[in-house]
Every structure is written in C-alpha cells, then in structure tokens.
Amino acid sequence: MKIENSLPIPQLPEAPSQGGLQFAVATEEDFDEIMAMSQDIYGGLDYLPTRYTAWLQESNRTVILARKQGKVIALESVCVIDDGETMLVEGLRVAPQERGKGVAGHLLRFCSQLVKSKYPEVKVSRLTRDDQLGPKDFQKYRLITKQGILLVRFRAEDIKLRLAGLGQDGDTLPASPPPPSSSSSAPPPFHLGLTEIHQLYLTTDLMRGILPNATIVQDWQPFKPLPSNMAILLKKEIDWMVDDVTCPTVASLCTFPFRVPIGDDWYYLNIDMFGKDLVLVRQQFLCHLRRHTTTLKGHVMCQMFLDPPLWKPMAEFCRHTLQVELVKEYTEQCVVESDVV
Ligand SMILES: CC(C)(COP(=O)(O)OP(=O)(O)OC[C@H]1O[C@@H](n2cnc3c(N)ncnc32)[C@H](O)[C@@H]1OP(=O)(O)O)[C@@H](O)C(=O)NCCC(=O)NCCS
C-alpha cells in the first residue's frame, strides 16, 4: 500500500484480500471522481458537494481517499474535536460496485491509525449512523444518543403561502390535547446572538437538561459544549434559537438552506431540535421555516432531528396542517462512539 500525504506515516493495516488499496489525502482535483461514485448517497441529500472545498481547508480535518488501480473507490473524513479527545468520522462512502467487500472497514481502520499517529491524545471515535444497528454493532459502539429523523419535502413558494395562514404556534392544528408541560400561547422564540450562545451553552448549566447526553448534535455532528467546539460551530451559517434565554425548555439549530444534488433547484434545510415540549418544538420549527423560505424559490428537503416521541405528532402536523409530503416513515440517527486503540 502506498500513502501520499503530508501526515506522519502510521503502521498500515493488512492489504485487503480483494486487492490492493492505496490511501491518499483528497485534493480539489479529486472532486469529480468523488462525485461520480456518490450518485445515490443519502437519497440525494449528500452534503459533500457543498462542503467538500471547505472540508479541505479545515485544519483539524483530513479527507482520505481509497483508490483501487488508481480509481477512487472510497472516501472518509476525520475531524478532531472535543479539545482533541474525539475523532469524528464523516462522509464515509464506498463506490456501489465495491460495497460488501470490506473496503469501509479497511478505510476506517486506516484513518483511525492515521489520526492516532498525528493526535495521540485522541481517545474515542464518534460517528452518526442512520441505518439499522444490530447487536454486533452495539458490541463495537456505545450509544451516545438517538434522535428521530423527520424528512419532508415541499416547494418554498407553497410553504410560504401555507405559513401565512398559520399563527406562530401553528394554531390551525386539529384539536388535540397539548402535553401537560406545554403552553399554547408561548411567547415567540429568541434568535440567539453570539454572546447569548456563549453564555447559554458554555457558562451556564441551563442546557444540561435539554441537550441529549450533553451533546450538541448539529447536522449529524456531535459536539460536547466546549469553547473549542463552539468556535467550529460558530463558523457555520446556523440559526440558534431557544424559547426562553433565562430558562430554556427547547433549543434548536437550523442551517441556512444549501443546495443538494437531487436536481437544479433543490435545497436542504437541516434542523436539530432539542427538548421535549411539542408546542415549543412546533413553534421553533415554524419560525425556522418562515425565516428561510421567504426569499427561497425551488424545492426544499427539510430534515429535522428530534426527540423520538415527538416524531409522530410532528409528522402529523407536517402532513395535515402544513400539507407537506413526508418523504419517509420513522427512522433514527444514532450517535455512537468507540475507543480508539
Ligand atoms: C455504508 C458503506 C460505507 C459500507 O461500505 P462497505 O465497504 O460495503 O462496508 P464493509 O464491507 O467494510 O463492511 C461493513 C463494515 O462497515 C461498518 N459500517 C457500515 N456502515 C457504517 C457507517 N455508516 N459508519 C461506520 N461504519 C459503518 C459495518 O459496521 C462493518 O463493520 P465491521 O467490519 O466491524 O462489521 C457503503 O455501503 C456505502 O457507501 N453506502 C452508501 C453511503 C452511506 O450510507 N454511508 C454511511 C454514512 S452514515
């Protein structure tokens, strides 16, 4: 096996039995080849085309390719977070014709060794998975948290009209008894500024009861609430929202819409919702939708990650009140970790 990058060369794993793999750090020039093997990824919601160039610039990230006979057949990105303790695995993909042959396993092991050699203080590897995990996986991983995934699609122009006919709480809802902790006339949510984000997430315990397992999961990425992670998060275009700055019950993070390769005018909106109060969750969801669809034209895939019990009532709200199309039934994302040895 051959390695072409500037990182220290680690002890390489054994050559895969189906043929030699060469590992290399990805460059701008590899983009087209990577896209060619990524056609079917995440049902068209692949974030990599939008993020690829930025990923290559990030100092704490390495994007590794596996080649077979010179052709790119797999990619994985590793990013060191949590004050250097965690290696975050993202973007993993293997070319369709090469799946099921152990390529991902080889790439994962290679990247793990590479990171360990460069950052010996890394203790755990974290990743999010939305496929069905079985007992074998849980021998390998510890579960950090689980979130329901609600995926809906609509035209921005249509949802704008629908939102105009709704109150801030979505009050044309069919009558159903609100959960006891809810208030149907909650004041409007707050968009947090920089200072408030720091205060709330770093200097108080106020988010402790809201964040799942004390983790900020933003668009599949799990971060511990630490200043170093906050610096990473604050570089992204995200709307941070809470119901109440002094005593929050529900908090959410929403990306600005970005293009995804489903078609020409397709956008993706990612919302991570923390907290268990249905009325407040619905309110923040509507607020994000209003804000991001005002000037948008085209199709939107909106994916919300939320506390699993809220999935069903939110799916009903989307279907019946917002009249948007549910793309899939309940699925969940698991944030998992394993020790890096
Ligand atoms: C998921 C995928 C990368 C697996 O590739 P593969 O080469 O067929 O996988 P392998 O033959 O090496 O065997 C699977 C191994 O990868 C692990 N794996 C499967 N999906 C994984 C994931 N999303 N993240 C990390 N590991 C994963 C399995 O647990 C298994 O580990 P084991 O060898 O310890 O049992 C491939 O099917 C693919 O590219 N799918 C489309 C993209 C995708 O869904 N990526 C997942 C991102 S969450």
Image (tube, helix red, strand yellow):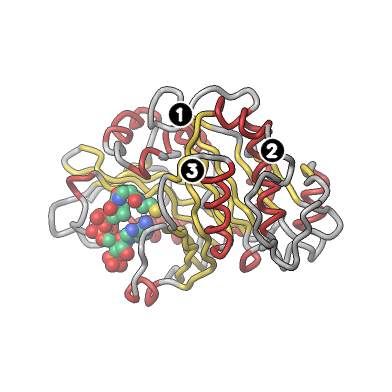
Point out the quarter of the image occupied by ligand 1. Answer: bottom left
Instruction: Decide if residue 11 is in sight here.
Output: no
Q: Secondary structure at mark 2?
A: loop
Residue drawn 40% across and 49% down?
Answer: 328
**x and y percentages locating residue 174 in the rendered image:** 63, 51
Mark 2, residues whose alpha carbon is within 10 Å: few (<14), some, or many (≥20)?
some
Q: Quadrant of the C terminus?
A: bottom left
Instruction: Decide if residue 182 is in sight here.
Output: yes
Q: Write down the quadrant of residue 156 in the picture.
A: top right
In depth, the one of 6 and 309 nearer the eye is: 309
Residue under pointer 3: 152
State the count of labels: 3
| Front: mark 2 or 3 | 2
Residue under pointer 1: 266
Q: Which mark is residue 85?
A: none
Disc 1 residue lies near ligand 1 with CB under 8 A? no
Reading the chain from its start, which is encountered first: label 2 or label 3?
Answer: 3
- Residues under numbered marks 2 and 3 in contact, where contact means CB atoms less than 8 Å apart: no
Image vertical order of residue 179 relative to residue 296, above or below? below
Reading the chain from its start, which is encountered first: label 2 or label 1?
Answer: 2
Disc 3 residue lies near ligand 1 with CB under 8 A? no
Amino acid at circle 2: Leu
Residue under pointer 2: 166
| Front: mark 2 or 1 | 2
